[in-house]
Image (cartoon, helix red, strand yellow):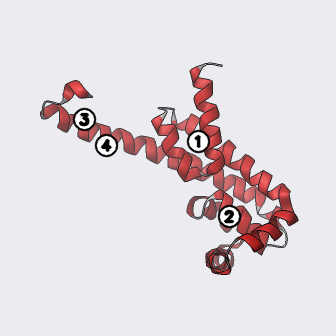
Amino acid sequence: MGIVEWKGVGLFLAGMTGIVKAIPVGVALKLSIFEIGSYVSLGSIVTVFIIYLSGEPLKKWITKKWSKEKMDKKKGKFSILLEKHGVAGVGMLTPGTLGPITSIIIGLVLLKNTSRLMPYLVAGIILWSFTLAWLAVEGFDLLKSIFGSVSYKLGYHNNL
């Protein structure tokens, strides 16, 4: 395996921990927007499906593990989104706001039919992964151009 493939594997694994955590890893590895979005999406989707397939035993473990206050706080945000936007809106919005792992866990606890959430959650993960990858790469390039030109004018161009 070449270095490019190992970067992809690393970003996939980072994507399994969540979208927001993995995007900076992709930027640091100097991967393209498409590569970042793809690997992060795949990693997050695999994690979501593992949690989804764990089903009832995981649901029982989570309700024991999480404090009532923490669960109520997450349920509150999720319930507001659910009432306002429905299952489709929740699936599209929560991967970027609460994170894909939290979204599926709360979905398991709150929704009777979590399978209705899954297609929207996958679509939301893909949408947020590519959008945040684009914003991160373009934002980083903008910062490099701004601070690169400033450092060049100050005489620090040899250090870039």
Mark 3 and mark 2 lie on one chain; the one further toward the N terminus is: 2
Q: Position of residue 17 (x, y in %)?
A: 63, 50
CB within 8 Å, label 3 to label 2: no
Q: Position of residue 35 (x, y in %)?
A: 58, 34
Residue 76 position (above or below residue 88): below
Mark 2 and mark 4 lie on one chain; the one further toward the N terminus is: 2
Residue on which the image places disc 2: 103
Q: At x 71% / y 53%, what residue is drawn? A: 122
Q: Is residue 9 left or right of residue 53?
A: left
* On-image quarter of the N terminus: top right
Residue 101 position (above or below residue 34): below
Q: Is residue 82 left or right of residue 117?
A: left
**Label 3 is placed on what type of residue?**
Gly
Q: At x 67% / y 49%, what residue is drawn? A: 44
Residue sitting at the far top = 2
Taking depth in this image into account, of 92 and 110 the one nearest to the observer is 110
Q: Position of residue 89 (x, y in %)?
A: 66, 67
How many other residues sit within 10 Å of disc 3, few (<14), some (14-19) or many (≥20)? some
CB within 8 Å, label 2 to label 4: no
- The residues bearing labels 3 and 2 have C-alpha atoms spaced at a distance of 39 Å
Residue on which the image places disc 4: 143
- The residues bearing labels 3 and 1 have C-alpha atoms spaced at a distance of 26 Å
Give the number of the disc on residue 37: 1
**Label 2 is placed on what type of residue?**
Ser
**Label 4 is placed on what type of residue?**
Leu
Mark 3 and mark 1 lie on one chain; the one further toward the N terminus is: 1
Q: Give the total of numbered labels.
A: 4
- The residues bearing labels 1 and 4 have C-alpha atoms spaced at a distance of 21 Å
Residue on which the image places disc 3: 148
CB within 8 Å, label 3 to label 1: no
**Label 1 is placed on what type of residue?**
Gly
